[in-house]
Amino acid sequence: MLYVTGASILVRFGTRFSWKEMISFSFLLGIAAQTFFMFIADLIGFGFTQLVLFFASFALVIFSYDLLYSYYQEHKQDIKLPAISLGSLNYPAALLFLLILVLFYIIAQKNLYWPAAEHDSIASFDKLGMVMALEGKIKISLFQYNLQGSGGIYPPLFHGGIAYMYLFGAESPKIITTLFYASLLLSFYALCKKYVSAINALFFTLLLEMVPEMYSHAALLLGNIPTTANVAAAGITLFYWIDKRENAYLWLSAAFVALSLWTRNDTVGFAVAAVALVAWVLAKEKDWKRIAIYAAVSFSTLILWTLYLQLKIDIPQSSRFVDHFGFDAHKMEVMILYVLSMISWLQFGTMSPGHLLYGLAFILPIIIILLNIKNIRKDHAEKLLFILISFVVYFLIFYMLDEKKQAAPISELMESSFKRGMFCFIPLLLFYASTSSVANSFSTWVENFRLGK
C-alpha cells in the first residue's frame, strides 16, 4: 500500500517518469504520506490506527486512479523483460549490475536478520515508533517523563515510519532501512541513466553503494539512510530540472526538500541552497510566483514542525544552540581539520581517515571536478554552488551548537553526527561527477571500445 499511495502522489506531478523513478520515488512519497496522516490525526485529537491509515491511503489512491491508469497505459511496454542475447549482451553493465545486487542482498540480509541494537535506535527511534503505534499519536506519554531520547525533537518521518511498520504487523521495523536504501540506489541510477550510458550509471551507483560507512548504516535502524535518500532525491531532481526544465521535476524537488526537513531539520542547508538556486535561475525570467511557491513548499515542513515543538510539545529547537554568537578560533580550526580528514586520506583525532570512511565518494568527484574545470560553465556550475551552500549551512549549524547543552565536545560531535550527516553530500557529488563532460567522454570511449568502434 505504501508504494501505491506514493505512486498516486507522484502521478500528480506528471506521468512521464520512468518505471524506475516510479518505484523509487513512490516509497519515499508513500511513507511520508503516512506520517502526514499521523500528524493530521494528532492535531485534531483523533488517534491513528491501522484502519485510519489504510482508508486515508485508499482515498488518496481513488482520487488519483485516473492518472495511475493513464501512467500504466503509457508505460506498460517499458515493464516487459528485455530479450537477452549472449551475442549482444552488455557484459560490463551486466557485471556491475550483478555486483550491485549481490552487495544489496548481503546488507539487506544482515539488516533483516539482526534486531535493532544501536543506542540511538533503542533509546529513541525504535522506542518512539513503538509507543506511537500503541498510543496512536505523535505527542506520546514518553514526553511527560522526558524519556523520548535524542530523536524526540526530530520531525516524525523516520519514527513515524517505524510506527507504521509496527501498526501493520512487523515484528521488526528494520525493513524500513532496506526500503529507503533501495530507493536511494534506484533513484540515483534512474536519473543518471537519463544522461549517460548504462555502464557509467551502474559504475557510479556501485560507488554509491560501496561507501563503507554508509553501507554499514544500511543495516542499522537509524535516520541517516532515510535522510540521505530524501536529500538525494531533492538534489538530483533539481539538477535534472536545471538541465531539462521539465516542471514536474521542479515541483518534485520542492516536495523532497520538504520531506528532507520532515526527516531531520539539520538538512535546512539543502532547503536554503535549493531555494537560492531556483530563485537565481527564475529571477532571470522574473517568475516570482514560482520562486515563492517553491520556497513555501520547501520550508513548509520546517515551519510546521517548529510550531508543533513549541506549541504542543514545548521543546524549542533553539535549546541546542549557543545563546550568544561569537567567533571561536579553536572550535573552527578543529572542525576544518575534521572536514579535511573526511574528504581525503589524512587522519585527525580518533576518527578514521576519509578514504576508509567514504571510499572514493569524495576523492573521485573532487578529482573529476578539477579535470573538468574548463567545462564548469557548460556543466552548470550552479549545481556545485548548491552543494557548496548546503555544506556551508550544515557546517555553521554544528559550529553554533553549544557543547555544554549537547553534553559533548565538538570533536565527539564531528566524529559522530557530523560524520554521518556527510552521507547527504555523497549522492549529489557522485551524480555531478557521473554526468560531467569528463566522465561522459570517458564513458563514450569505453562504450566505443566495447562495441569495437
Image: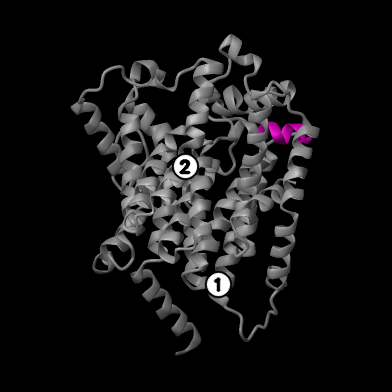
Q: Regarding mark 2 in the picture, which secondary structure is present there?
A: helix
Between 308 and 151, the one lying in front of the other is 308
Q: CA distance from mark 2 to mark 1?
A: 37 Å
The percent position of residue 23, horizontal first and vertical second, equals 65, 56
Task: Give the residue pinned by disc 1.
Answer: 93
What span is in magenta? 161-170
- Name the amino acid, label 2: Ser
Residue 236 bears which disc, if any? none
Q: Is residue 391 magenta?
A: no
Task: Give the residue pinned by disc 2.
Answer: 298
The percent position of residue 435, horizontal first and vertical second, equals 41, 66
- Name the amino acid, label 1: Ala
Q: Is residue 128 visible?
A: yes
Q: Is residue 360 visible?
A: no
- Mark 2, mark 1: which one is toward the viewer? 2
**Does residue 177 appear left or right of residue 306 in this picture?**
right
Specify the farthest residue to the top.
Answer: 145
Q: Quadrant of the C terminus?
A: bottom left
Between 277 and 230, the one lying in front of the other is 277
Which residue does the image show at 47% across and 62% down from the upper left? 204
Badge 2: residue crowd in 10 Å (few <14, some 14–19, many ≥20): many
Badge 1: residue crowd in 10 Å (few <14, some 14–19, many ≥20): some
Which residue does the image show at 68% across and 71% down from the upper left? 78
Between 93 and 162, the one lying in front of the other is 162
